[in-house]
Image (cartoon, rainbow, N blue to C red):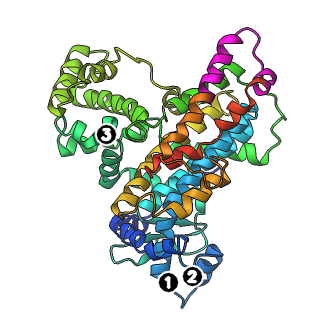
């Protein structure tokens, strides 16, 4: 596939003016529709056949209806996010069935929906070959080049996300939504780095976590192989069942909800950021100068006034405890070829990390618009029922309670692993742990507690 051309000057100018505040305003204006148990009005120009309507409205002499389009983009943010987690769950289902190609296909779409969700929060709507940025005025400005050489959803999503990652506001957003210990990342780092140095290392955060955005384009190319080519033309050795099982329960372990959503995952992201920042600041890695790094960590923790757990935090951050990074992070950082039996795990892992960021951005949008659990109940209640997360009219009082089923399932497959180390097979695993495997495909749970509803 030919390399994508960079965005042109006019597109970048338009995208820089995309307004997060305008999205918040549009999201706030959805409230009257919530009372009618809808995200947007039935009369919204783009509520049905959105692409066809935009095609008609962008013809010469026509114009989009700015308010309707802005509300559509704002409402799409949490919905793309939830869909992304659904795709991730289906990818895990396929992974558990030994179908790495379908898992890769669905994992890629989880990545794509995460990107579209995050960009919607930032004021950018991706619509086939017509893409828009919501300006401060609330008007929706086209950000695609004129003429026939326009990019579709897949190409434009990654080009715009790559551009966004280089902007100051991307660092500012990440520094707010990543919250180890319930403390925003910016508070962890403010005593250690000036604004300029924070920006310089912040632009590397996504890559440090394994989200090198060029890899998403490569994942798309790999997805094409799974989607359009016969998958059994050349036999590839499958991943062994114990590794498959181990990956699933470790993915869930780092997404366990505690006092704050993504608390466990965020701790490991913080550790990577601190190590990257230390190297940028001193020119040496933590391994080359562990003593100074430990002093820096002690100083940071003392200024944050983390009292009861300060030693636990220190041990984690200097890798005295839990020295290995979670498998989701290590797999996301890899760049294997498509015939590697772990390639689909790398796609799923990158999707998980990008979904974590998108979910945090959507949660922040919901809070800024002053919406809560009851405001969005018209959506999340039937969503959970449709996905089989609870019986009709039996939703949990706290959506974090959805973890209880996951805890049971994780323990079951871990026990199965321990008892079947010498004779494990996909057939036995699927037969003995069918219910647990099914439950561990319900990643919609992460969307619900991750949005902090």
Q: CA–CA distance between discs 2 and 1?
A: 7 Å
Mark 3 highlights which residue? 182
**Helix, strand or loop under label 1:** loop
Give the residues drawn in magenta, as a range. 409-431
Percent position (x, y) of residue 192?
18, 34
> Which of the two residues, 177 or 174, is positioned nearer the viewer here?
177
Q: CA–CA distance between discs 3 and 2?
A: 40 Å
Q: Residue furthest bottom?
A: 61
- Specify few, some or many for label 2: CA neighbours under 10 Å numbering under 14, 14-19, or 20 or more: many
Instruction: Examine the structure image and report whether residue 322 is included in the region drawn in magenta.
Output: no
User: Disc 3 or 2, which lies upstream in sequence?
Assistant: 2
The circle drawn on residue 65 is 1
Residue 301: which quarter of the image?
top left
The circle drawn on residue 45 is 2
Seen in the picture, residue 140 relative to 272 is either above or below; the reply is: below
Seen in the picture, residue 53 relative to 196 is either above or below; the reply is: below
Seen in the picture, residue 31 relative to 250 is either above or below; the reply is: below
Residue 250: which quarter of the image?
top right
Question: Are the residues flagged by discs 2 and 1 in contact, CB closer than 8 Å?
Answer: yes
Percent position (x, y) of residue 244?
67, 25
**Helix, strand or loop under label 3:** helix
The circle drawn on residue 272 is none
User: Disc 1 or 3, which lies upstream in sequence?
Assistant: 1
Q: Residue at x 55, y 80 (%)?
A: 44
Q: CA–CA distance between discs 1 and 3?
A: 40 Å
């Amino acid at each position: 596939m030919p390399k994508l051309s960079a965005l042109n000057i006019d597109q970048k100018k338009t995208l820089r003016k995309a307004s997060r505040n305008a999205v918040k305003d549009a999201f706030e204006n959805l409230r009257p529709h919530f009372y009618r148990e809808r995200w947007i009005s039935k009369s919204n120009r783009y509520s049905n056949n959105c692409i066809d309507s935009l095609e008609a409205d962008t013809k010469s002499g026509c114009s989009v209806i700015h308010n309707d389009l802005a509300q559509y983009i704002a409402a799409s943010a949490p919905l793309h996010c939830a869909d992304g987690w659904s795709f991730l769950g289906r990818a895990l289902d396929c992974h558990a069935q030994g179908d790495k190609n379908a898992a890769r296909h669905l994992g890629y779409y989880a990545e794509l929906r995460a990107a579209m969700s995050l960009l919607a929060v930032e004021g950018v709507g991706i619509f086939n070959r017509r893409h828009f940025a919501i300006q401060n005025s609330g008007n929706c400005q086209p950000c695609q080049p004129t003429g026939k050489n326009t990019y579709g959803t897949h190409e434009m999503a990654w080009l715009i996300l790559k551009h966004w990652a280089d902007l100051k506001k991307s660092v500012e957003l990440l520094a707010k939504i990543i919250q180890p210990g319930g403390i925003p990342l910016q508070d962890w780092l403010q005593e250690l780095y000036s604004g300029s140095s924070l920006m310089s290392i912040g632009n590397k955060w996504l890559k440090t976590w394994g989200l090198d955005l060029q890899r998403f384009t490569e994942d798309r190319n790999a997805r094409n192989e799974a989607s359009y080519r016969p998958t059994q033309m050349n036999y590839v050795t499958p991943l062994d069942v114990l590794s498959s099982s181990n990956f699933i329960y470790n993915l869930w372990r780092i997404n366990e909800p505690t006092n704050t959503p993504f608390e466990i995952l965020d701790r490991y992201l913080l550790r990577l950021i601190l190590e990257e920042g230390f190297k940028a600041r001193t020119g040496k890695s933590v391994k080359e100068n562990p003593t100074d790094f430990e002093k820096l960590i002690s100083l940071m923790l003392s200024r944050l006034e983390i009292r009861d757990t300060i030693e636990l935090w220190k041990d984690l951050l200097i890798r005295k405890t839990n020295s290995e990074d979670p498998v989701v992070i290590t797999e996301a950082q890899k760049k294997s070829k498509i015939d590697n039996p772990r390639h689909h795990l790398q796609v799923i892992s990158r999707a998980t990390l990008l979904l974590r960021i998108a979910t945090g951005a959507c949660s922040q949008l919901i809070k800024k618009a002053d919406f809560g659990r009851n405001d969005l109940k018209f959506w999340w209640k039937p969503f959970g029922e449709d996905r089989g997360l609870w019986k009709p009219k039996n939703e949990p009082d706290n959506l974090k309670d959805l973890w209880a089923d996951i805890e049971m399932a994780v323990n079951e497959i871990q026990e199965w692993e321990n008892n079947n180390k010498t004779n494990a097979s996909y057939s036995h695993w699927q037969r003995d742990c069918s219910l647990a495997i099914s439950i561990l495909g319900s990643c919609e749970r992460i969307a619900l507690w991750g949005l902090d509803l």
